Image (cartoon, rainbow, N blue to C red):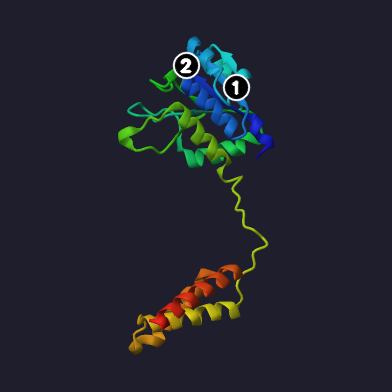
């Protein structure tokens, strides 16, 4: 995925809010992409956005175009983003999850553009005519549109979500063995007896449930040691009463 990120072009058409332009640029930087193209930007907003904190590198290398056609002419796939609303659908429309998968595959073989419309009106019919298909973020119907910067961030996150997830688990932590777990369980059961929690009539059934519950905890050796100390202290306190 890292090598193919250079294939993606984020295109903002007719943006007017410098904060949105800056937020989009920052999202591009956050998720490791690099290409921002701006079509017919409101000049004052664009110049103001170029000083956006922590997004200056993306904005300084961004490209300006006078038409969507010019901005996408080197792209093998152009995807428009839309909430659709009440407009008649003229293109295939995919949810972000599925659209993201298609875009990831396409990025492996050539430049791909994701096109975002203006904050007020979204993409025009003319702008959509340059798209191969459309993609929507599954917002609720009563409030379909999203802030431009947030929409860019969500789309970019989706592109890296499945390819870069990682779980960091310390490899040096030893799991409790059966002997440690057994001592832990026996001490807990002693504590439950002393406290009156165990009902003698169903004690065996309850003890079995407790043992199964402890087994599911998958305790580390260190945690088992700490809990043994805690239970011993509690048991000692109960017996002093």
- For the residue carrying disc 2, how many other residues have a C-alpha within 10 Å: few (<14), some (14-19), or many (20+)? many
In the image, is 112 to the left or to the right of 80? right
**Residue 129 shows up from this direction:** no
Residue projecting furthest to the front: 240
- The quadrant of the image that shows the C terminus is bottom left
In the image, is 193 to the left or to the right of 169? left
Compared with residue 186, is residue 62 higher up or lower down, i.e. above or below? above
State the residue position of label 1.
Answer: 56
Instruction: Tell me the residue at 67%/38% (across/down).
Output: 2
The answer to which of 129 and 158 lies nearer the viewer is 158
**Residue 88 shows up from this direction:** yes
Q: Secondary structure at mark 1?
A: helix
The answer to which of 132 and 226 lies nearer the viewer is 226
Q: Secondary structure at mark 2?
A: loop
Q: Are circles 2 and 1 on residues that touch, CB within 8 Å?
A: no
Q: Which mark is residue 14?
A: 2
Compared with residue 197, is residue 108 higher up or lower down, i.e. above or below? above
Instruction: Tell me the residue at 60%/22% (across/down).
Output: 56
Number of numbered tags placed on the structure image: 2
| Residue 204, image quadrant | bottom left
Percent position of residue 98, x then y: 50, 41
């Amino acid at each position: 995925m890292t090598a193919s990120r250079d294939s993606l072009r984020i295109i903002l058409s007719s943006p007017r809010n410098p904060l949105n332009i800056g937020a989009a640029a920052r999202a591009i930087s956050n998720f490791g992409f690099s290409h921002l193209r701006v079509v017919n930007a409101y000049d004052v907003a664009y110049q103001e956005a170029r000083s956006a904190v922590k997004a200056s590198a993306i904005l300084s290398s961004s490209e300006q175009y006078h038409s969507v056609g010019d901005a996408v002419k080197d792209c093998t796939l152009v995807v428009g983003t839309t909430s659709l609303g009440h407009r008649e659908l003229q293109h295939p429309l995919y949810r972000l999850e599925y659209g993201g998968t298609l875009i990831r595959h396409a990025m492996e073989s050539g430049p791909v553009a994701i096109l975002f419309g203006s904050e007020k009106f979204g993409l025009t019919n003319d702008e959509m005519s340059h798209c191969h298909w459309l993609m929507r973020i599954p917002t609720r119907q009563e409030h379909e549109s999203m802030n431009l910067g947030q929409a860019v961030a969500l789309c970019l996150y989706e592109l890296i979500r499945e390819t870069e997830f990682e779980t960091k688990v310390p490899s040096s932590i030893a799991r409790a063995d059966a002997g440690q777990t057994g001592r832990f369980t026996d001490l807990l059961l002693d504590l439950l007896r002393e406290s009156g929690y165990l009902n003698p009539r169903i004690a065996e059934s309850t003890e079995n449930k407790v043992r199964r519950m402890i087994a599911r905890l998958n305790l580390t050796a260190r945690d088992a040691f700490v809990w043994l100390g805690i239970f011993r202290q509690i048991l000692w306190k109960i017996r002093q009463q």
